[in-house]
Amino acid sequence: MQSYFIEEIISILSKGGYVLIPIFVVAQIGWFFVIERLWALRKLSCAQRRFWRDAPNTPEELKIFVQHKGDKLPGLFGKLVKGVSNGVEQGERTMINDVKLVLNEGASSMQRHMSTIAVMAGSAPLLGLLGTVSGMVATFQIITQYGTGNPAMMAEGISEALLTTQAGLIVSFPLVLMHNTLLNRADTIETECITGATRLINGLR
């Protein structure tokens, strides 16, 4: 079964021509960064429910609670709590500045490699188009030399054109979806953390 699968892959690659190789490489690079971003955003996800469930209501008790929890919360919200706990003695302005600094660093971290995924998603169909053009050029060369009397001789160029176009679209479409999903996830995390930090600073007044 495994040898048959390998033979099928080799057959498809040989029919698709050399352009399938960079399309395959683009797919590997794109999905590597998609998986890396999924893991990174999972680590940055806000863990606020448990924090607010245990948080006291009075400012003084909340201040002690924040200082105690500052180094123990995971994710981006945990970094915000730590920033607030470090500046709580200096007043509201210091806390706000610390929150802005953490959010800027967090936003930069969440956007890392997003442009690379977008470039891989956009380059795959362009490579497929390149394969289409090269396949059609090969087909026209066959027609010029031998005419249209033997369709079997033209099949190789047509096969290359169709396979590369199909491969480019197959690679591009899920990468575009994952890129949009990752951007939405990053925006959600940032919005939740801004809301949580605002609520925390208001509670410490």
Image (cartoon, rainbow, N blue to C red):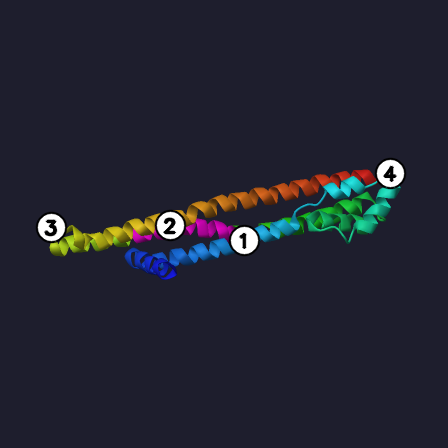
**Residue at 84% of width from left, 46% of height from top?**
65
Q: Main secondary structure of the magenta part?
A: helix
Amino acid at the residue labelled 2: Gly
Residue labelled with disc 2: 168
Q: SS class of the residue under badge 1?
A: helix
**Residue at 57% of width from left, 50% of height from top?**
38
Q: Choose mark 3 or mark 4, whichever is in front.
A: 3
Is residue 79 at least partly visible in the picture? yes
Residue furthest bottom as drawn: 3
Gap in angstroms between the C-alphas marked 2 and 3:
31 Å
Amino acid at the residue labelled 3: Gly
Q: Earlier in the sequence, mark 3 or mark 4?
A: 4
Q: Residue 65: give its label.
A: none
**Residue at 65% of width from left, 43% of height from top?**
190
Q: SS class of the residue under badge 4?
A: loop
Residues at marks 3 and 4 touching, judged by CB atoms closer than 8 Å? no
Amino acid at the residue labelled 4: Thr
Badge 2: how crowded within 10 Å, few (<14), some, or many (20+)?
Answer: many
Q: Residue 35: give its label.
A: 1
Q: Earlier in the sequence, mark 1 or mark 2?
A: 1
Residue labelled with disc 3: 149
Residue labelled with disc 4: 58
**Quarter where residue 60 is shown:** top right
